[in-house]
Image (cartoon, grey):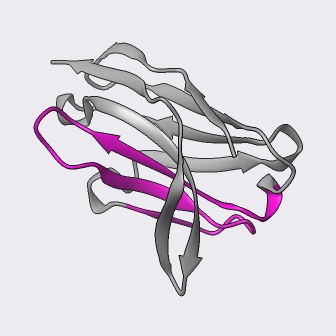
Amino acid sequence: VQLAESGGGLVQAGGSLRLSCAASGTFFSITAMGWYRQAPGKQRELVAAITSGGSTNYADSVKGRFTISRDNAKNTVYLQMNSLKPEDTAVYYCNAGYYRGSMYYPANSWGQGTQVTVSS
């Protein structure tokens, strides 16, 4: 699976952005997808994930502000980010992975990342 993120940019605190991740391949509709982020000097962390059936889970730090969704007809997964905070500043990556139980695990299939910068 090849992944390509877009939609990052510079936004003021309180603003919104929508990230998109276009996936190649014929198995997108049965593949779980996740969004990760990595800030300078920090480890990459899971932000949100979605099953093939549309069930979602979120990191506590983004619950109520971010929404992950998917359009299987377009082979695309989205991350709608509202009420952005300076601490959301990071490079955001999408990933094609899998679930075991309720836990999302990344597979070795990453996009190139898109920078999100939130100014205070």
Looking at the rendering, the stretch of residues picked out in magenta corresponds to 29-58
Q: In the picture shown, does residue 29 fall above or below 113?
A: below
Residue 22 among those drawn in magenta: no
Q: In the picture shown, does residue 60 fall above or below 120?
A: below
In the depicted view, which residue is nearer to us: 19 or 65?
19
In the depicted view, which residue is nearer to us: 119 or 32?
32
- Is residue 19 visible from the viewing direction of this image? yes
* Relative side of 27 to 57, left or right: right
Image quadrant in which you'd find residue 78: top right
Instruction: Identify the residue at image location x=47%, y=69%.
Output: 105
Residue 32 among those drawn in magenta: yes
* Relative side of 2 to 7, left or right: right
x and y, in percent, of residue 93 in the image: 45, 39
- Is residue 15 visible from the viewing direction of this image? no
* Relative side of 90 to 2, left or right: left
x and y, in percent, of residue 107 in the image: 53, 61
In the depicted view, which residue is nearer to us: 93 or 72?
93
